[in-house]
Amino acid sequence: MKKYYSRPLIYLFAVILTSLSFLSSKPESLLPWINENFQLAAAKTKAMAQASGDSSRIPVTMKTAGQAHLANLYDWRSGFFAGNMWLLHEYTGDAQWQQEARKWTAALEPLKDFKDHHDLGFMMYCSYGAGYRLTNDARYRDILVQGARSLCTRFDQKTGTIKSWNNFKSWTTGTVYKFPVIIDNMMNLELLFFASKVTGDPYFKKVAITHANTTLENHFRDDFSAYHVVCYDEQTGKVVAKESAQGYAHESAWSRGQAWALYGYTMTYRETGDKKYLKQARGLASYLMKHPNLPADKVPYWDYHAGNPAYTPCGTNAAKYKSGVQPRDASAAAIIASALLELCDYVPKKEGAEMIAFAEASLKALSSPAYRTPMGANANFLLAHSVGSIPHGGEIDAPLIYADYYFLEALLRLKKRVS
């Protein structure tokens, strides 16, 4: 498959013009387009499930040979494929999608006792959480609560955070930090808020709020952009380093990290009503929507400062991208669009309208041939051109299962606004 940035400029301009014309579309005209996206997603998801063989082998990205890379349930991305099926069930009302979603969700049940890293929110809330929201299955609720208990074992009172990875080795100094916290961790708090609501136990919510407050204090710069990794001293609880694992540079704005922050603080405001979280989400939304290095089609480069000579690249492969056209990250665009389509309801009308317009344009670009692939292509992932980690040399300009998930979630949120 050709890379996005190798295509003729005239084709890129056509994509941009399509996105701009979309902004003036009447709400009712969006429904056929949304439906067409879900029809293709249904066909591709069905083919992907058949190719995977059984629910213990979960598609997460694509191998270079054009085949899906299959992971086990302990991969942090394991919940998204079942989540896609729940979103398809929600959109279509088709009982067959619920049946498939239940099968792929059930395979994840051992995760309720998993404590080796922080990603239980991704793994369980995008699967079991979606299932419970749509079915009220009491067993799903109980499994989610147990998963929340497991996640809370990684909370540390001294640092006031949930430990993300078990360690992190700095790209620049080689120092191994024993208590790293990444901005992605904000996404796991929704599981804890849920557990407090359904059990009445305030502890889960207290852990979530404490983590959100500590992250708010330590993870952000004055312009609202977020560091990727903040490392703490386990004995004192103090910050000892602010770095990046997957971004271009320690001080740069890694695109997917900014997307996680935007989504995470929007969700945290929804769950708490605390205005400081809304302020952070609004500030970050403005930063992302108005960034001078944002391409016209509103699909960001993998890092907002990639290739900027003022920043020193970190990692073994980032240096290769010091100049030239940078890879895009469709997954970051999808996450941002979904977050904006919630955040728009919490802000003044004019500001919300700008967020909606931005999200619509981004989704239209993602659904164009520049990013969305036809049936049978791209190992049947819906979107191409995402980035896992350039510094680690992995999943560069590749499809990623969570890009598809947040693309579908954003489309569903948009549909609910216009139907």
Image (spheres, rainbow, N blue to C red):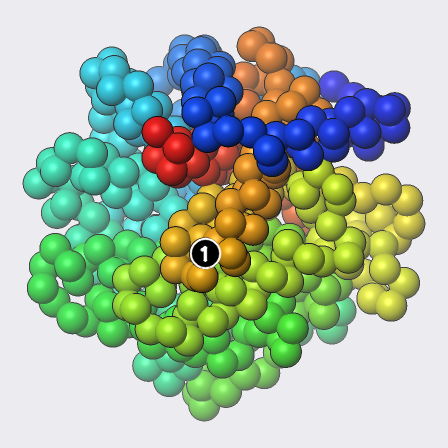
- Identify the residue at image location x=25%, y=74%: 206
Looking at the rendered structure, the number of numbered marks drawn on it comes to: 1
Q: Nearer the viewer, residue 369 or 145?
A: 369
Q: Position of residue 397 (x, y in %)?
A: 71, 34
Is residue 208 visible to the viewer in this orientation of the structure?
A: yes
399 displayed left or right of 410: right
Give the residue pinned by disc 1: 349
Circle 1: residue type: Lys
83 displayed left or right of 234: left
Q: Nearer the viewer, residue 282 or 3?
A: 282
214 displayed left or right of 393: left
Residue 290 falls in image quadrant: bottom right
Mark 1: secondary structure: helix
The quadrant of the rendering that contains the C terminus is: top left
Is residue 103 visible to the viewer in this orientation of the structure?
A: no
Q: Position of residue 315 (x, y in %)?
A: 75, 57
- Identify the residue at image location x=43%, y=36%: 414
Residue 128 falls in image quadrant: top left
102 up-or-down from 181: above or below:
above
144 up-or-down from 362: above or below:
below
- Identify the residue at image location x=74%, y=73%: 173
Q: Position of residue 329 (x, y in %)?
A: 66, 41
200 displayed left or right of 389: left
Q: Nearer the viewer, residue 113 or 90?
A: 90
Q: Position of residue 2 (x, y in %)?
A: 78, 21
Binning the other alpha carbons within 10 Å of mark 1 as few (below 14), some (14 to 19) or many (20 upward) gives few
The quadrant of the rendering that contains the N terminus is: top right
